[in-house]
Structures are given as C-alpha cells and as structure tokens.
Image (cartoon, helix red, strand yellow):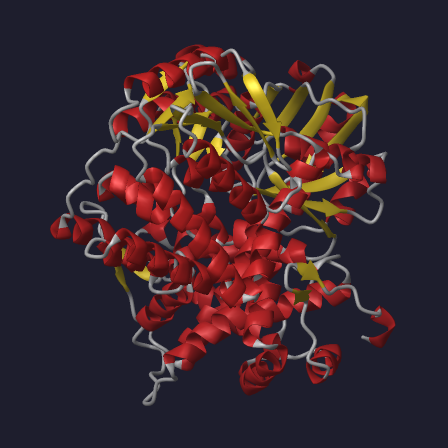
Amino acid sequence: MDKINPIYFTYFLSERDEQGVVLISPLISTETIHGNDLERLEEFVTIIRDQINLNEVKGIIFKNPLIGQAINYDILLKQALDENSFKLRLKSLLSNFNDLNQQKKPIVGLMDSDCISLQLSTQLWAHCRIALEQIKIGFPEVNYGLFPGFGATIQITEILDAQDALPLVLQAKIITAQKAKEIGLIDLISSNIDHAIFLAKTWILEHVHEQARKPTPPWDEAQWDNLTVPIKKRNLGIKPNIDNCMAVIYQKHNLSKQEALRIEIAYFIQTLRDPITCSIIRTQYFGINEATKATDPLVHTPFELQRMAILGAGMMGSGIAFEAARSGIDVILKDVTLQQAEQGKKYAEKVSAKWVELGKMNEEKRQALLSRISPTDQTKDFGEVDLIIEAVFEDKNLKAAVSTETLPFLNNNGFFASNTTSLPISELALVSPKPENFIGMHFFSPVDRMALVEIIRGKQTSEQTLSKALKVVRQLGKIPIVVHDGPAFFTSRIFFNYLLEAVTMLLEGIPASLIDEQARNAGFAVGPLAVLDEISLSLMLHVYDQLPHLHLSQRRCYDYLKKLVDSGRNGRKSNRGFYDYEIASGKKTIWQDSNLPTLTTLPETINIQDRLLHVMALDSYRCLIEGILDRPIDGDIGATLGIGYPIHTGGVFGHIDQVGLQKFVNDCQRFERLGEQWMIPTSLHQLAAENFTFYLGLQSNWPIQKQNL
C-alpha cells in the first residue's frame, strides 16, 4: 500500500494512499501501551470520523486499535466510580461508532494479532473483518466478572444468531480464525499482513458505492429459551455479569439501536460497580496473572527441567506425566509393576487422543508427547534426573521408603518434590541427606484440567529449590501459590473443614439433601456430601489418621464416617455412601440416615450457606496469622482454583470483605456453640472493631503490624 499524508496522533498513525484508502495503525511505545483504553478509543473513533468525511477518502482500514490483549481493568473500575461522567463518555463513543457503522463508505477491520476482549469489541463495528490465519478470537470477560461492553453485546447479536453468539459472550469461548469465518464473525482470512491489507483495499474499492451492511439474524424466542435455561440454572443468579448480559441481549431485540446501546451501557456500568466484579477481577485476573509472571524474581534460576521421574502411576502420577510430556519434558513413570506403570501411560494416550479429536493437538504432536513417557518398574532406568516427584498413596512410611530408594538418582542440581495433600513436608524431608532440596508440590486432580499447584516450603527448603519449583510449575503451564509447612498445609486443611462442617450439620439433624442443595446455591459446583462420596470415606479417614490430633468436632465426624464405612457405605466406589448409586443407569439418590436426629425446626437456608462459606474463610484467617499463608491473595487463588470455593466471592478473604468483617465475626460467634472449628482468634475481633478489610479495591491491605495480632 503506497502511503501518503502520514498523520501522527497520540495513539495512532493515519496513512492515506493515492486511491483514497486510509490505513489506521496503533503507535507502539511505552506511553501508548499503558494508555487509557477509553481515551484511546475516543481518539480512534475521532480519526475515523474525520477521515471518512473527506471527499477524497474511499474507505478505511484499521488494525487492532489496542496493544496487547489486556483491558486496563484497574482504570476501567476507577472510571466507573464517576458514573455520570463515564456514562456520558461511553454514550458519546458508542454513538460515534454507530454513526460510522451506518456510513456508506466501507470500513474494514484488520485482525492482525489475537483479537481478544476490547479489541474484538472494536472490530465488530467494521463492515468487513479480515483476520490473519493464526490468531485467536474471543471474549474472556465473563471469567473476570464482566461481560463484553463497548457495544459488543449489541453488535455480535446483529452479526450472529444467539446459538453462535452466546458461547462467545457468556462462556468465554476462544475460537480460531477458521471457526470465526465458519460462523460468519469474520469475512476473509489471510496468511500475512501485506496480503491482508491487499484484500482489505480490494474489498473497499469493490464496495465504494454501496452500504456494506448484512441483515440482522431474526430473533427466535424458542431458541433463546433453550439456550439460556441451562445457563440460568448454572448461575442461580449468583454472578451479576451473567444475568446482566442476558438481560441486554433479550431486551435489545425490540429496541432501536441507540436505545439498545443505552441499555448495554447501563448494565455494563452497573456490573463494573458491583463489589462482586471487583472481587473476581482481583483474584481471577490480577492475582492469577501475577502468579504466572515469568518475571517473578523468585524464578530467576538457570535450572532447566529436561528429564524427570514420577513415583506412582495412579491418577495423579499419570496426570503429572501427561502434563510434563506435553511441555516437552522426558518422563520416567515408575510403579511397583511394569503393568501398572504402562497403565499410567494409557491415561496420556486417552487424554491426548481426546485432544486430537477436539483439534487441540495433531497426531504428530500426540505421538511425540507419548514417546516422552517411559513406564518402568526399575529405579535403574532413571539414570540421572533433574526432578523426582513422588505421587504415591498418602502414607508416611510408604513415602519415606520410595523417597529413600530414589533420591540417589537426582543429579547435583536436581530437587525432590512430594505431591502429598496433607503430610508435613519437613517430616518427609528427614529421609533426604539434603533436606534443603526437598519441597512439596501439591497438584490437583485431574491434573490436565486443574491449573493450580500448591508449593509447600518445608522448614529447611532453600530459596534455590523454591525458585526451581516455581520455574517447573510455570514450565508446565500451571498457576502456583506458595505456602508454608503445617498439617494439611492450606487448601486441604480448609477443604477438610468444608467437608466436616457438612457432616456436623448432618449429625445435628439437618437433612442431607438440604445441605448439598444449599452448597450448590452458595456457588459450589458440587455439594460436600457428594464430594465425600467421590473421594471415598475411607480415604478421608486415612487422611485424618495421619494428622497429629483431632479436636472434639473432628473426632465426632470421624467416628460417624467410620461407622458408615464399617457398614459398607464407602462412597461411589462401593455404590453406597451419602448417596445410593444405581449401577445400570448411573443415577444417584441422596440417602438420609434414619438413625440420625431430625430437627423439628430447620435453620434458615442462608445459615447453611454461611456455615459452608464461613468455616473455610475463618480457618484461612488462622492460616494467615499462623504463617501458613503469607498473603491473602494466595489464599483466594488457592481456594477458588484448587477446591472450588465460589468464584463470585473472589476467594476466602474476598468473601470476608464482601460480608463485612464485623458481620462475619458476629455470624461466627452465633456458630461457636456448634464446635471448635468456630473459635475466633482474638486478633480477628480486634480487626473487626477497626472495620478492617483485607483489600482496598484491587490492592492488598495486608500485612498489618503482626505484633498487634
């Protein structure tokens, strides 16, 4: 494209060629990259408006107007605080975009890089969209408590029917350029930027004298109901962004375009100003991004993981082997027998075959992945390895035995990690001649779908070993949190409280069906009694057998679980537990123990939800003041990603802030008569009296002076 008349603006460069086609490109500098998104788009739409009104201009091509994929959520949240000003600016911006969309002169959007979030919102205003073949397209906003704004929710439902639009705006589905073309979201695909510009210019010159707008897909009420009923059922009105987004789409179909845009702006600002949104963004966006940063000074180590050994080829060990091999690491997968080790590799075969079927991987990459996993029953096959991960049954003596046997195969720069869920790392490290090279790496099952890894520092774990472990976790594409040693560490410890609080309520006479129902209504994906059945009651007993002591409430629950196991109710694997399981149909039915008391007056349902949410949050605070956790954000990431704490809370500490610390303490005081798990540390009373919050908006408000705790 021969360029004349280049014009430089604050954020953009505008260039017009001899045929009257204008190309608008973002300027790349430190100032423009970290600029204000709204301010940038205001300049962008002004440039297009001024250029399109020139007689000599035949049409506009614009590249993705924003640098990078991220929305500046912190700035956006601050702007929304001044509701009137923000509303006026959005109304003006979207009105200008809409006017341009109604223009007869053609406007072509060029997706020259991954088109995510606000980039895609802007592209939807173009008459034609051309994408490079390797890019990804989508709206991840729903994962962060928002929905696509800036006209996107209106525009996408004018381009696509609800069946194709809803997965993009409500399920954070990221699609390829090829898929986007199939559903009609983009018009053309190119292999390189020069060819894409050529296609854009050609399209403009072919459409100079016509208004290049496609008809809006017809509204289908029955289709809408079919698509949204399951979404509403899953959301249960908990996340305001989901309900608000559906409200915008539903209301827009019988409104004018300007009225529809006003509706979207109102709901968008309402969502931005909701405390739930801030909580979700803080944990799921800023917290996780910070945890995965390769620039973390703790990760500055020359250590490179190339070859590792995994002890135990069960579900956990085989899952870790798959993830390691997928990341290009050679894996020795050891079990007691070769047959068991080979069975572990079959897990990788099964998962990778599914990935090929879904288009996530081709067969060549699958075979390369599988070739990196070597099953064995012989430690001599290890050679020298950079890392050994022990993933055997949760038994101190067994772990000590396999650790002692395999430690000599670590190279001089290697380290040893235990995948224990609850056993103290400092004790497990006693078998090592170099306990400073011993650490905990707690993966979550199924490993290929669970992003979190809880790294546990033992008393003697060195900074170098911690750095290596963090680097490995990021090499595997996982999200790390770092916690300190103690019985059950953090995630397992608070999760056990969740499970046992459910058993406690059962023993009080609260119906089993009501407990699991209210857990789901509180935002948990699965009720605690159903979870106990899945992990098996006997395994829960074994875990508690490994703990140094049990308080009275724990002992009472332990005794009841043991009674159930002794009677043959061990959970799903015995077809009987808190649920009865039909083998033929696969259906399950809640079981109510007739030997338990039944309350004549049931508690308000909110109390059940409060108890399940509060009991984990209260123990998380204990973890914080005991030094298991260093920061609230680690607790929030660990709780939401590791054990399914409801995302709308932002996590355990986000939940306390949403409830309000004084009310939270008052609630826990009401529950104190129900067991030791509700004992409130004196320091929490002090903080409540000061109206303390663990966060100030997106920023942590911790640590405070610990000598005052």
Residue farthest along the front direction in this orientation: 55
Residue 501 in the image: state x and y as whole percent. 50, 71
Residue nearest the viewer, comparing 62 with 523: 62
Residue 293 in the image: state x and y as whole percent. 68, 38
Residue nearest the viewer, comparing 654 with 128: 128
Q: Quadrant of residue 355?
A: top left
Q: Vertical placement of 186 versus 249: above or below? A: above
Residue nearest the viewer, comparing 674 with 104: 104
Can I make out residue 34 in this image? yes
Q: Vertical placement of 82 versus 442: above or below? A: below
Can I make out residue 495 in this image? no
Q: Which residue is found at the position 64% from the left and 57% from the top?
A: 635
Q: How many marks?
A: 0
Residue nearest the viewer, comparing 128 with 427: 128
Q: Which residue is found at the position 38% from the left and 58% from the top?
A: 530
Q: Quadrant of the C terminus?
A: bottom right
Residue 652 in the image: state x and y as whole percent. 58, 64
Q: Vertical placement of 1 versus 656: above or below? A: above
Residue 527 in the image: state x and y as whole percent. 39, 61
Q: Which residue is found at the position 51% from the left and 66% from the top?
A: 83
Q: Quadrant of residue 189?
A: top left
Question: Horizontal placement of 514 versus 704: left or right?
Answer: left
